[in-house]
Image (tube, rainbow, N blue to C red):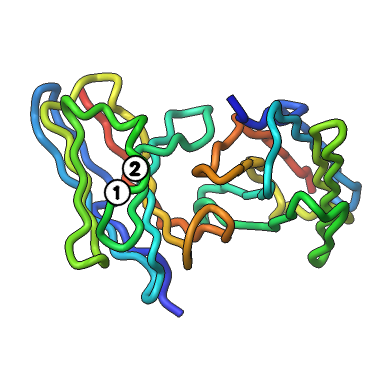
Amino acid sequence: EAGVAQSPRYKIIEKRQSVAFWCNPISGHATLYWYQQILGQGPKLLIQFQNNGVVDDSQLPKDRFSAERLKGVDSTLKIQPAKLEDSAVYLCASSLASYSFEQYFGPGTRLTVT
Amino acid sequence: SQQGEEDPQALSIQEGENATMNCSYKTSINNLQWYRQNSGRGLVHLILIRSNEREKHSGRLRVTLDTSKKSSSLLITASRAADTASYFCATAENTPLVFGKGTRLSVIA
């Protein structure tokens, strides 16, 4: 079974620039999550999709972050414009259904904003 | 917040010893999950224990859950150098998982 795929693996941008991350979940997984993990901390949920609908985006900074999941499969997370404090690892995860199930994580994208 | 808090923050043991880490949380849950994160394999699910369960085993892992004390423990027996990683507990109660800050385990060969 193929795992969760993410790209790019690393990205360095200057503040105020834009960046986009891509995620392809495990086939058949209805639920997709984007997390932000700052060094030394646990992952923090940014947004959760169930198929192509948003279940929870309460911690997504909507003035600069946006995400979509077209056709209930792949997803993209965008930051525009980036700030220094956005430097973190962005993790995508998927699960069969909701939080009652284990989540499978991708390798993450390490973003550095200079 | 129902965020789990792991204890200790860091743990260093010799290979072959057992490692125990704890997680405390504040509100009711319907399940608690443990994850491991290292640079080689990213964040990996280890075990899920539901609120009506008290103990689960998976290989060298043993997880206990005490809902009356709102706490869980993860025991790794006969540790190996490859167990060196950060371990996170995550809790859920009809809401998305909330992760703690993790315990950094170092197993010295």
Give the vertical position of B86 relative to B4 (above or below).
below
Residue at the image point whose x is 82% and y is 41% from the top: B73
Disc 2 marks a residue whose amino acid type is: Ile
Determine the CA span between mark 2 and mark 1.
Answer: 7 Å
* B80 relative position to B34: left or right: right
Among all residues in the image, which is located at the extreme left? Answer: A17
Q: Nearer the viewer, residue A17 or A65?
A: A65
- Looking at the picture, how far across and down is residue A104, in whole percent? 49, 60
- Looking at the picture, how far across and down is residue A19, in whole percent? 14, 39
- Looking at the picture, how far across and down is residue A11, in whole percent? 22, 41
Give the vertical position of A108 relative to A80 (above or below).
below
Discs 2 and 1 lie in a common subunit = yes
Which quadrant holds residue A25? bottom left
* B29 relative position to A26: left or right: right
Q: Nearer the viewer, residue B4 or B95?
A: B95
Residue at the image point whose x is 64% and y is 44% from the top: B85
Q: Chain under label 1?
A: A
Look at mark 1 in the image and give the residue it sits on. A54
Picture quarter with the C terminus of chain A: top left
Q: Helix or strand or loop: what does disc 2 sit on?
A: strand
Disc 1 marks a residue whose amino acid type is: Val
Residue A47: image tag: 2
Q: Residues within 10 Å of mark 1 (few under 14, many from 20)?
A: some
Q: Are marks 2 and 1 in contact (CB under 8 Å)?
A: yes
Q: Earlier in the sequence, mark 2 or mark 1?
A: 2
Residue at the image point whose x is 41% and y is 69% from the top: A29
- Looking at the picture, how far across and down is residue A59, in whole percent? 36, 30
Q: Chain under label 2?
A: A
Among all residues in the image, which is located at the extreme bottom? Answer: A1
